[in-house]
Image (cartoon, rainbow, N blue to C red):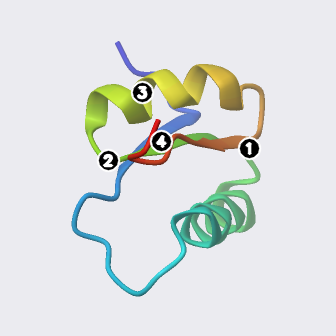
Amino acid sequence: AVSCDEAFLDVTDLVGHDPEQMASIIRKEIFETTGCTASVGISLNMLMARLATRRAKPNGQYYIPGEK
């Protein structure tokens, strides 16, 4: 199950961009469009991104880099 206030970012193929900055932009756009906050987990695959979301709650973001 996924909550409507969660986002999981798989940044496996992201080149030349900062994953945390990208998450901040997404969270800002969600808030400006809906008035709702969002928690974002970021990592190199969906499983790790989902685990990162646990640390991001509430209304935050957490990045697990590939080295961890």
- Mark 4 residue type: Ala
Disc ID at residue 37? 1
x, y percentage for residue 51?
47, 22
**For the residues marked 2 and 3, what is the alpha-carbon distance in whole angstroms?**
11 Å
What residue did someone put label 2 on? 44
Earlier-in-chain disc, 2 versus 1? 1
x, y percentage for residue 3?
49, 22
**Residue 37 shown left or right of residue 48 in the figure:** right
- Mark 1 residue type: Thr
What residue did someone put label 4 on? 7
Which mark lies nearer to you, 2 or 4? 2
Which mark lies nearer to you, 2 or 1? 2
Q: Quadrant of residue 47?
A: top left
* Badge 2 element: loop
**For the residues marked 2 and 1, what is the alpha-carbon distance in whole angstroms?**
23 Å
Q: Residue furthest left?
A: 13
What residue did someone put label 3 on? 50
Disc 2 packing (10 Å; few <14; some 14–19; many ≥20): some
User: At 65% from the left edge and 65% from the top edge, which residue is drawn?
Assistant: 33
Q: Are marks 4 and 3 in contact (CB under 8 Å)?
A: no
**For the residues marked 4 and 3, what is the alpha-carbon distance in whole angstroms?**
8 Å
**Residue 14 shown left or right of residue 37 in the figure:** left
- Mark 3 residue type: Arg
Which mark lies nearer to you, 1 or 3? 3
**For the residues marked 1 and 3, what is the alpha-carbon distance in whole angstroms?**
17 Å
Q: Observer-nearest residue: 7 or 52?
A: 52
Q: Observer-nearest residue: 4 or 14?
A: 14
Q: Observer-nearest residue: 65 or 8?
A: 65
* Badge 3 element: helix
Earlier-in-chain disc, 2 versus 4? 4
Earlier-in-chain disc, 2 versus 3? 2
